[in-house]
Every structure is written in structure tokens, then in C-alpha cells.
Image (spheres, coloured by chain):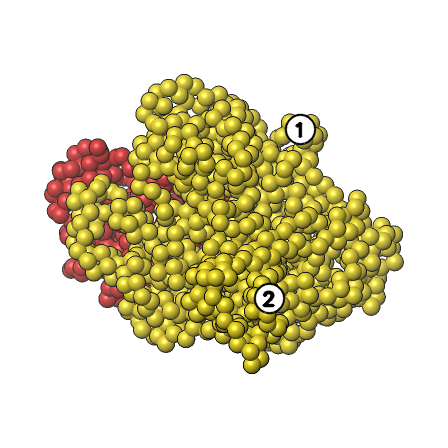
Chain colours: A yellow, B red
Amino acid sequence: MKVSFTLNGEATAWDGPPVTRLAAALRDDLGLTGTKIGCDAGDCGACTVRLDGKQVCGCLVAMGQVEGRAVETVEGLANGTLDDLQKSFLAHGAAQCGICTPGMLMAATDLFALNPRPSRTEVEDALGGVLCRCTGYTKIVDAVMAAAAPAAFATAASGAAIGARIPRLDGHAKVTGTDVFGADGIPADALWIRVVRSPHARARFTVGDLGPLRSRLAAVLTAADVPFNGYGIYPDVKDQPVLADGLVRYRGEAVVALVGDRQTVLSIRDSEVPISWTPELPLVGVDAATAPGAPLVQADKPKNLLLDGGVRHGNAGDAFARCAAVAEGTFETAFVEHAYVEPEAGWARRVGDRIEVYATTQTPYMDRDEIANLMRLAPEAVRIVPTACGGGFGGKLDLSVQPLIAIAAWKLGRPVALVYTRPESMAASTKRHPARVTAKFGCDAAGKLVACDVTATFDTGAYASWGPTVANRVPVHAMGPYAIPHVKTWGEAFFTNGPPAGAFRGFGVPQAAIAHEAMMDTLADRLGIDRLEFRHRNALRAGDTTACGQKLEHSAGLAQCLEALRPHWKKAQADVAAFNAKNSIKRRGVGIGCMWYGIGNTSMSNPSRMRIGLAADGTLTLYSGAFDIGQGSNTIMTQIAADALGLPVSQFVLVTGDTDLTADAGKTSASRQTFVSGRAVEGAGRDLRQQILRLANAGADAVLTLAGSTLTVRDGAEVRTLDLGKVGPLLGEGTFDPPTKPLDQDGQGIPYATSGFAAHLAEVEVDIELGTVKVLRMVAAHDVGKAINPTLVEGQIEGGIAQGLGLALMEEYLPGRTENLHDYLIPTIGDVPQIECILIEDREPLGPSGAKGIGEPALVPTAPAILGAVHQATGVRVKRVPLLPHRLREAIVALKGTP
Amino acid sequence: MAEYLRPHCLEEALGVLQRPFTVLAGGTDFYPARVGRSIDEDVLDISAIADLRGIARGPGGWRLGATTTWGELIAADMPPLFDGLKQAARDVGGRQIQNAGTIAGNLCNASPAADGVPPLLALEAKVEIASRTGARRVPLARFITGNRRTVLAPGELVVAIHVPEPAHPARSAFLKLGARRYLVISIVMAAATLEITDGRIAAARVAVGACSAVAQRLPALEAALAGAMPDASLGERVEMRHLAPLTPIDDVRGSAGYRSDAALTVLRRLLQGFAA
């Protein structure tokens, strides 16, 4: 059917099936990929456009309904320039990964059409239909509120980039909708894949005659088509098949891949694919997996045990007897979904004897090596070109679409694309490990911690993924950021028929922190010591030795964080007491949570190599393999490079992520990029600067300026010019691998070169009768060593808090039951409170300009702070998260003894 | 190739329905049920039929066109009788859903958690159904027969919802409990309409949703409210025995026991709110 309508002010004709979604027509047929698709179900608002001036989800409008109407998309906002709203988004750091940004902008545009001076609540009401998983919404609301008079962009002069709040360098594309995400750059002639997945958590199966399907399609792939059908994070654990081979171990596991033209593969129903299933009783949860006689999930893993290990320091067993107070508790957490707004997507093509993969990822080099291994190719035969990544949070460290598109494109010699649907993304991808943490902490009469004994048991699901990383990292952190002489911690992970549990912001530490912080509250209460002061008394400080036997030489700023929170804490306590004196149905509480987090891999090499090139024509290029998934490393790396070299940020061109063009800077994970790759890029900048100074025979303090191909070097009164056409090209290179030492069998060694420290304060209001919790306010103090870009650091903290709030109060992934974004709840713009960030800069000498990491530390203390506040408000010590309203209400009733 | 028809007049639509078509209006339930697969059924799009749109007041009451959106309802100039329905409209999804989703679509989808059903039950709404052979009006309480089930027969289409003019001046209210602020499916919701004369409640209609396969009126509570003064103590009249028609279940959003407990609280607060 032909449809005529007005698109961004232009008369437009479209032809196609009238039931086509507006969002699909815009993207696939009209080339406007600024409108993003996050769920195709009206749950996320990423596809928000204006239809006759009203915001609607483009995924819910039939093209047949668009006839004669006016459609406005992000591309029409300012015709290629930036309107005030877009400028305000940039200036405030309101776009991180950018996948929700077009939807947010259109929702805000809708608001301004009705109301030029909206209140905060009106902004929230207008933007409440768009989900963001990165920002915690704070900077989005600020940007909208300030849009009437947007602030000027901060700039940084040469040598003054570090510490400057410059807008993110890749931000223009994010606020104009021109950034190319996994589903945005697919060639028109690409074939499509639809994956047939297991409806069973555990089953054997056989595939019947695929001949009839193959005759309709370009290919139907099964396990037999995968050259080496196993992948996994660790070189020695390749346990996850690309396509299951006769046995599925979790609901959502890939079984058959249909490859053909898009319409055809989408029209084939699962019931048309001849798979005969023999379901078996699945192992749900660790208790089932460890029961006597439990069947094995992985044949070569006896007792379903993936890994265990711990830290032993002093003699915890005997020390408890000498304690004045001892607290004990067991705490449980659920599977948590990353819920990045961009579902996994990408495409691949064969170029001669090489395969090129364009996909959303957090780790281009690991993808390259893994694809090479799966396809039995040399790593050099694989090129990974990461697309913009619409949120990762650990979930895009594992392979998703990459193997199937690569194998199919290789086999068929045509580009092949795969875009996960939302339910598919949720069913197939990794999750946060459910944990059961049993903790026992003791202190002396003065409130000094003496001993702790913590066992953390994790459900690692069907495949190892990052399970070993979690099981290793948690024992090192499970005592909390405190000096404790006698420590015994243990981590263990078991296979089940749950979804593979992998990496998720914090690698198990957020789960453990819920336990150790509950213990701090309990001990403090028992001794009548203020909860903040109890933590301050025990905080690890520079000069202390950790339970791993590592002496913290520098940069352990927990005490400073707590000192910064102290006035907020005292005021909040007074506010809460005053409120509670007048109210009984609504009760308020204030809580505190602390954490430490080792930056980079645990006792394992994780080097970065960065390069800066100065071409003969004067083009200054940062070649960064440190991939930006929204957290801001493109900007951070450039700021560090600029000051190390001595040229302004504005002169840099960025080449990022492409494994053919950049060096390996490791994965965007473990909060490592600022610290590790940042240190490497600092080295690259200095290396290039040294080469220039040598060529100019200039001293260390010389000032550089670059104009065209002329590089001017001023050394005091001496001015020398270098013609890059003659002396170029120049290449500076830097590498860094944080110094660590392996842990012995008692966990003694140097697990991390440095750690981040933080304390959060949460003020909550509990509805006693309904069990609902509203977080009223958060104050977050983080020791980041040095904030390279404070706006971006705050963005990480605010986003981490939103995810921590979700972990505490609403998020629980249940296979088959919460596989969409209306049954699986993440915080909306109305759920995240105003957040005050306090940046503590206790310099880390190893880091670039003293900087450490922030990505994961941002999330860890939030849930403990909220749960502590709930305890103060209600007397309920929460043992299981998420604290859904019915769970809290039931606990309140149980505590009171009567409903 | 599947058919897609978008007639402009009702007669034509009813003619089309002589054979099975999936009816599409706001798309807010249609598309979410078809994620990741091609749409190959025959579709009757009723969004262009002018007769199905708009809100009108007649001698006996109000007519809400079937494809009136939540957003249009919110923007409409309506008496306090509709405050509850308007509040429900504001609590549906986000603005995007309110601008697209239709009132009749909410009823026809017949979810146990449909936000429009309790307030319309409390308004004693009737559903006007048309087919080629005639028209009928069915009280909403009889229109939805179960989880995702209605009395609509093949060939029939909902054309309007009728809200009778109450005998006395009336106000209504709605309260929804969910686990987050926006875009949330109700754990419990309640709606009430109170007709007030001489400072006392002449008639009360109260309904609770998400606590049974179909939202339920609470006749015992309504009886207990009759004659009372709508003051701050009104909520205290709610007793657990009034909730007998509810049959809550355990699901991902809450336990059955919690739903009963929370329904009591939500009802008390809802009624208390009439004093304000």
C-alpha cells in the first residue's frame, strides 16, 4: 500500500505492507535509523517519535495509520545542526551510550510543545515512557530543565584537558541520531538469521529432515556447521556451543539458525522446524545442583562444581571467641538482567579469506580471538569492527550474534545480519549470578573488627562464562573495605540449568556487599556505635595490609569518603527522626553502604596498548582499542592523551575499536579502561612528545602547537618548527599492565594494583502498609584517584546507583516469566532520586594523573545503603533481594506479629 | 498476502467482519504480541472510523467512542464523575501508550490488570457492540468473561462505551499500586464512584482489579458505604470480608496474600481520598 505523509516537514511517499511498524519503515525503508528499537513492544520508548505532534512509540503504529499525517523523528530536530535541547543534552552529559537519547529528545520535544517551562515532575511525567539504563536519568532531567537556556560547552586549553568537564567527543552523533549501533548499518543486501531456541531448560533433542526448509532458505545451520563448536571466556573452558548439539542446558539456548531473506526467516514459525524434544527435569538453583545424585549439567564437572577457592588470613575460627559482638546472616540475590536498551545486533561479511564482523560488543579483541577459534581461522583472518554499543554492563563481554553471522557469511559469501528481539536478548544472554552469601563478622568492645567468615555460593547457570571471575573476585572483596586481622572467605560456583551467569557490573561483589554491609550495621547497632562511625573506625587506609597480605601503599580513600558523607548523614538522621516522630504509616530511614573494588583483572595480566599517530599532513590520530560502550572512554582517553602530548583535545581524530586499526587495549570491563588503558595512552602521548622534543632538540617544558602540517615547539624563548611532511609520520606508543601477583592457595598475593573505594548514603521512605520503598535521596562519595572528566564520572555514579536501586528493589529475571521489559522491571525516570556526587581524589601513583576506575564501584554500595535505610525505617533486615513490595510487607507483618 | 483494511465507515467494517479479521486500533496490545515475527493475519484497522471516536454527552449519559485514546480522555473536559477514569488513563504506560492506546482496546484485550476496567465498572459502563445484524449493549461486568476472554462473537465490534448519568452528583477516584513509578503493570488497583446527596453517600460503586481474572465490584462494601458521610473516616469502613469476590493469585508481581492485604489498604486510601 502506498502511504503519503509528512516526514520531518517533507512530503514523503512510502510503499509496503500497511501493517508494517512505523519504526521499521523509518529505519529499513526510509533510511532514518535515528529512531531506535529496544523492544518492539512499547515497553522502552527508544523508538519515540511524534505523530501529529504527539509522542508515540514508532513500534506500535501501523504504516496504514500514518497516511496524511505528520511524523517527526530525531533527524528532524534541527536539520543537522543542534537545537537547544540537543546542546543541553551534550553540555550536561545526558547521553551516555546514546541508544535512548533520540527517544528522550522526542519525548522532551513533545513536552516543550505544550509547556515551555516544565517543572521537574512535569519533565518526569513526559519522559516516563522512555527507559535509560546508563545515566540514572539525573543528567537527562537536568538537561531538559535547562534546555531553555543551555549552558555553553566547557572547553579545555592545551595542557588543561584533565579535570575538564568537556562534552563527550562522540556526543554529537548520539544527540543527532547518527551514531551507528549494531542494527543501524546493515547492508541492504544482507541475508538475515533467525535463531530457533530451546523452550526447555534441559532437554535432549534431534533435528529431523531440514531439506524442505533448506529449499526455502539460503542455509539452515546446526551444530554440524560450526567448525569448533565451543566458546568461553577462559582459554581452557570452551564449554558453550554456538548451536546446541543434541542437548540443551538452559531455556533460550540456540539450536538451529535459519538464514535467508529477512521476510522469509521471520515468517517461519518454530513449529515448522523439525526438532523433536525430550525434556528432562531441569536443575533450578544451587540446592538442586548440589543435591546428592543430582545429574550433571556439564559431563566433565563433577558435583556440578565450576570452581571454588578463598582467602585465609590469621585464624578466624578462634578469633570469634574473643569478640565482644558477633553478627551472622545469610543473604540471597536473584538472576539480574543487564537490560541494555540496545538488543544484541550486528552483521558480517566475507572479504576474500578474511571475515569482518560489525557488531555491538565490549571486547573487540576477545571477539576476534574467539571467532577465529570457532571458525578455525587465524586471528589475523578475523576483523572486528565494533558498532556503537547501546549499553553493555558486562553483558556484551560474551559473544552473542557474532559466531552465527560470521559462520553464515563465510559459508554463503554474502553479508549476513542478526538482530535479537528483546525476549530473545533476555532469554539468550548472560545474567548476574544469583548468590547465597553466609556471613559472620565479629568485633571487639571498642568496635574494631576482629574476624570474619564469609561463604558466597553462586549459581553460574548452564555455562561457565565469567563464573570463574566471579568466584575468584568475591573472596578477595567479601570482607568489605575494612581492616580485619582474621579473615576466612570462600567463593564457589555451581552449574545449574539456569541462564549462563556471566559478567555484570561488579562481578559478584555487589551481592557480597549486601552481606558485609548488613553485618556492619548489626555490629554497630549492637555496640551502640553510629553506623557511619563504625565503618570509619574500621576503614582500610593507606598503609594497611589487606586479607590477601597486600600492603595498600596509596590511594585508599574510604575514610575520606565517609568524612565527606558525615554532615549529610547527621542531617539525614535528624530529618528522618523528625519525619518519623509525626508519621507511622510512612516511615523513613537512612542507610550507608561502603565498598572497595579492585581495578582490572584479579591477579591476571590485562595489558593495554595505545597509539597516537601524527601524520605527515598534520592529522593527529588517537588509535584506541579501549572501546567506549557509553561510559566515556573515547573522551577520557583523548583528554589524557592531549595533556601527555601537550596538544589540545580538539585536534585529535579518534579511531577506535577496529581490530585492524588499533592495538589490543583489552576489554571494557573490570573498571579498567581509565586506569589501564589511560595509563597506556598517557605513555603513548609522552612517547610521541619525547620524539617531537628530540626532533626539535627542545626541553621537557616546551610548548607545542600544531597548525596544518607545521608543528611549532616553543622552548622558552626558542621557537622551532617541524615540517611534518618531512619528519612525519610519527607514532607514539604506550603499554601498561597493572602489576599484580598470583594468589596462593590461601588467597595471599597481590590481586590488584589499585582499588576504588566508595560510600553511599540512601534516604528512603517505606509505606508500612503496602511494603513499597521510595528512595528519596542518594549521596555518593567515591575515591576515584583523579576525575579525568568529572561530568562523565558523575554519569557513571548516577547510572550505577540506578542499577543498584534496581538490584535492591525490583529486578528479578525468571526464565520464561520475565523475558520482556514490562514483566522485568528496571527503574524508570520516576524511580531514581536526586543524587549528589562527591568526588574524592586520593591519587593513585600508577594511574594516569592519579586516576582509578569508577564503572563498577558506582553500583556496589547502593543496594546495601538502601537496605540499611529500610532496616532503620522498619526494623526489617532484608535477607533476599529484590525487595518487592510483597516481600517487604510480609516481613513487616512477620516482625510485628500481626497484620 | 494478508489483507489490511482501514475503512472509514462502520458499516464497511462490520461487513468486513463477516470473516475472521484481527482488529487493530491503537496497536499497544497488537504489536507486543507479534515481536520478532512477520505479521501474516488479516487485519481490520478501525482507527479511521470517525463514528468510533470522541466523547459525547447525551440525555441519558456519556458516550465514549471505542477508539478514544487515553490521551484524548485526559484532555477532555469532563465532570468529577470521570476523575477516576482520568486518573487510570494517566497511570496507563507512558505518554506514548496514552497517546495511542484506546479505551475499548483495553476492554477487549481483557487483561486481569487492565487499568480501564475498575473505573469503568465503578461507572456502571455498558459496552455497545455492533454487528451487521444489529447492536447490543452489555454491562461491562458481563462483557469480560475471563482472563483475555469477552462475550464478543465473530462479526461483532465494540463501537462505544456508555456511562449512565448517575442519579445524584457523583465523584470518582482511582488508585493503582505498582512496583515502579511509570510503565508499570498493576499489582492491585481500585476505583470508586460515590453519588453524594445531602452530604451523604446515596450510592457507592467500588471495583478492584488485578486481584481476580476479571476486575470485580465489591457489593458488600458498596452497601456498607451507603448512607455514610464521605469524610476522612470513610476508609475505616472497609473490612476484609468485603473482599470476598476477589480471588488473587501468586505471580511475579506479588503473592496472593499480599494482594488481599494491599487491596484492603488501597481501598481504604482510595475512599479516604474522597474527603480531600
Residue at image position (45%, 21%) is A207
Q: Is residue A331 visible?
A: no
Q: Secondary structure at mark 1?
A: loop
Residue type beneath disc 2: Arg
Residue wearing tag 1: A300
> x%, y% of residue B129?
20, 44
Judge depth for marks 2 and 1 and give the one in front. Answer: 2
Residue at image position (58%, 47%) is A503
Which quadrant would residue A673 be assigned to in this image? bottom right
> x%, y% of residue A274?
41, 22
The numbered dot on residue A694 is: 2
Q: Quadrant of the C terminus of chain A?
A: bottom right
User: Gap between marks 2 and 1, in whole Å?
Assistant: 59 Å
Q: Residues within 10 Å of mark 1 (few under 14, many from 20)?
A: few
Badge 2 and badge 1 in a common chain: yes
Which quadrant would residue A495 be assigned to in this image? top right
Residue type beneath disc 1: Asp
Q: Secondary structure at mark 2?
A: helix
Q: Chain letter of disc 1?
A: A
The numbered dot on residue A887 is: none
Q: Quadrant of the N terminus of chain A?
A: top left
